[in-house]
């Protein structure tokens, strides 16, 4: 089954049962970026999803995904 999710405001069709980790990996590969999950932070429906939870988070119809640079520093 195909579902529609929104990545940074743009609609994207994906198969259901796609994890957030897989989706981010596919985006990085498609854009020519290095497949490095540490290089971005993610939120779904305005809720931060830590990198360690992305594999267990399955995207649902209508989810709004935001990607952004992680905050680092000391």
Image: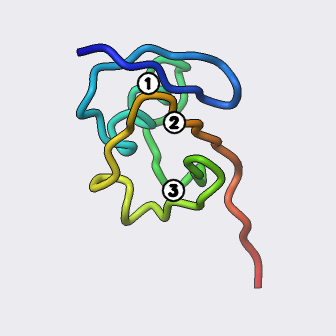
Q: Tell me if mark 3 has few (under 14), some (14-19) or many (20+) residues whose alpha carbon lies within 10 angstroms of its own.
A: few
Indicate the quadrant where residue 20 lies: top left
Q: Specify the label residue 29 is tagged with.
A: 1
Q: Earlier in the sequence, mark 1 or mark 2?
A: 1
Front in this rendered view, residue 61 or 7: 61
Which one is earlier in the sequence, the residue at label 3 or at label 1? Answer: 1
**According to the image, label 2 marks what residue?**
63
* Residue positioned 23% across, 15% down in the render: 1
Secondary structure type for disc 3 = helix
Work out which quarter of the rendered image holds the C terminus and state it: bottom right
Place of residue 23 in the rendered image (x, y in percent of width and height, measured from the top left): 39, 33
The front one of 60 and 68 is 60
Give me the residue at 43% from left, 14% from top: 13
Q: CA distance from mark 1 to mark 2?
A: 21 Å
For this rendering, which residue is in front, 28 or 44?
44
The label nearer to you, 1 versus 2, is 2
Secondary element under disc 1, as helix, strand or loop, is helix
Q: What is the spatial separation of the Cα atoms under label 3 and label 1, in whole angstroms?
A: 14 Å
Q: Tell me if residue 10 comes above or below residue 45 in the rendering.
A: above
Q: Which residue is tagged 3? A: 38
Q: Nearer the viewer, mark 3 or mark 2?
A: 2
* Mark closer to the chain start, 3 or 2: 3
Report, in whole angstroms, how far the alpha carbon at label 3 lies from the one at label 2.
22 Å
Is the C-beta separation of discs 3 and 2 under 8 Å?
no
Q: Is residue 5 above or below residue 64?
A: above
| Contact? badges 3 and 1 (CB < 8 Å) | no
């Amino acid at each position: 089954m195909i579902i529609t999710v929104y990545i940074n405001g743009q609609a994207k069709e994906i198969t259901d049962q796609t994890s957030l980790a897989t989706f981010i990996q596919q985006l990085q590969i498609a854009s020519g970026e290095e497949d490095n999950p540490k290089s971005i932070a993610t939120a779904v429906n305005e809720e931060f999803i830590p990198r360690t939870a992305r594999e267990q988070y399955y995207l649902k119809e209508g989810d709004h995904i935001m990607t952004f640079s992680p905050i680092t520093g000391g």
